Amino acid sequence: MAFPIFDGHVIGLISYNLSIRTPNSKEKNGVSTAADDVNSDIIPSASMLKQLAIGVETTKIVKSMKDLMILARDNSPVKERSGLSLYAMKSFVVGEKEDKFAAEFGRDEKVMSFIHLIMDPEGHLSRRKSRSRMDKAPKVTKFSKEVHGAPPESFVPELAEAMGSIKTLKKMALFWSRVVMELRRLWCEGKHIPGIPTDEIPNLNSCLLHQQLQVINCCISRKQRRAIATASLDSVLKQANNIAELSHPPTDLLPESPHVYARISSGKFVLRLGADKQLENTTLLDTGEPVYTPVMQEWPLLTEDIIKETEEFVLRTGSVGAGCSQLLSDMQAFKAANPGSILEDFVRWHSPPDWTETNDESKQVTGGDISPSRGHLSTRMQKEGNLWRELWQTAKPIPAIRQAPLYYEDLSVEGILNGLENISPSSLFEQLFVSLLSSGCAIAEARVSSNEFLYKVFKECKDYIVLICQSKNWVEKANDICQVYETMAVMALDPERVIKIMNAQPDQTHTKEDPNKLRKTPSKNQKDNPTAAQSSTMFSKKPAKPIFC
């Protein structure tokens, strides 16, 4: 496996020459509030990333964000590095209500501005427009996938920026409480979460928080589709009732409505229920009626944690999972949409490889129409005791909208929202950290990708971050990640100045010297651990803090 070679002297050179702070810069609670905040509209500032990193470090012993509201004081996370006291831990049993924190939250104008920014779809989109260069850069890679973050310019990175701008753990917890409350409101009102795809299955390459928000939006879209399907079914039933009420219904009315009625082998017309659209050039084998694809129940939405739980359940119990229920549901929906159908008709549509048709020469043309094609099922389908045959015999013609749900959207979303209310602070901050990191790196990469020389140095930084984030103990190296990110942000904000600095010191760069002379010889432990070796190379001499520290 190849590991990126990180030139610590080049990065140190950049950091040193940019270490002079601006006169107007000030530090509040150990976090700079000058140039980094000014440029935060271009790229997330390193101070936000540091706040999230400190949040991860200081909340490891806290079980939930609700508990954090009780424990946290009005101190900056920078001053809370030492952890929470035993006295604070004892306050768990006091039973103090969290409601007063939610009431106080509404009076905080700064935190409310974050809520309005994130929850207002127009404001959210308008902010993304300022970073549209990222979509046009051909060299921008899928950084969020590599570090298991969230897609750049989506909801989670925006949330991470807002959270990283808050200076106390107490207000971080209060802010999160309000975010969850707004998510619940959007769900109840049937409105999609801004910055999240409205109808995509969870992206397992993203962080769990992004996956869960995708589930919420998907469930909203599914409920909307179910409402449409219900209205369509009611319309068909109403039309059928109107025809049935006629004392002498016209004989030519039924054949002219094949999407409503189907003729079965006995010659009677039976109502189609839950039909979606006609399948081209396909007819039922016994009746010759056109085949209609049914409206089916959709598959359960699975996030990475649910998939893991399902796999453990299957291994522990030997259950076949939800596949059997889904197949039975599809059969019932198909029977309802295609009266007079047989198992062979269902297999032709649902599993074409299990059906072999006869040659086209055997098809007979009668009155300009092609007669139903014949063929045979596969060997596995013809075996006695085949599961498909058993399910087909028990399946009743029931449209999907009238079946027992295979996936309860309300229960699923309620479980997600309850889980977000009680999420572990360190888990939340970790996901926000990598999401903000990936978003900032993607923005920075788009800005430096046009300069081949600068992009080469930038890519070394990015490869180093990816390598660290893919390790199990990346949280322990969060400070190193923040330091490298600062350098990448400087490259994006002032590339000309960085290039000038590097060109002014040719003897100290790897372009004029043997690269091996610029690195310390790694120790035996470092040779065994490539990640540690690279970290040692880069941070063997601690550089001065950059201007955006």
Image (spheres, rainbow, N blue to C red):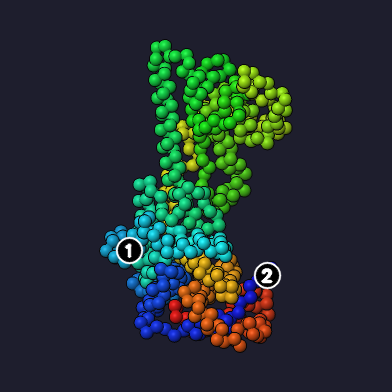
Q: Which residue is mark 2?
A: 2
From the viewer's perspective, tell me whether residue 50 is left or right of residue 360: left
On-image quarter of the C terminus: bottom left
Total numbered labels placed on residues in the image: 2
On-image quarter of the N terminus: bottom right
Point out residue 470 in the picture as x, y percentages from the top left corner.
58, 66
From the viewer's perspective, tell me whether residue 45 is left or right of residue 484: left
Q: Residue at x 43, y 41 (%)?
A: 223
Q: Secondary structure at mark 2?
A: loop
Point out residue 133 in the picture as x, y percentages from the top left corner.
48, 64
Point out residue 392 in the picture as x, y percentages from the top left corner.
60, 29
Q: Which mark is residue 113?
A: 1
C-alpha separation, residue under disc 1 versus residue under disc 2: 46 Å
Residue 143, image quadrant: bottom right
* 548 or 165: nearer the viewer: 548
Q: Residue at x 63, y 72 (%)?
A: 4
Point out residue 339 in the picture as x, y percentages from the top left corner.
54, 24
* 392 or 262: nearer the viewer: 262
Q: Residue at x 45, y 64 (%)?
A: 131
Q: Is residue 21 above or below residue 304?
A: below
Answer whether residue 35 is visible to the viewer in this image. yes
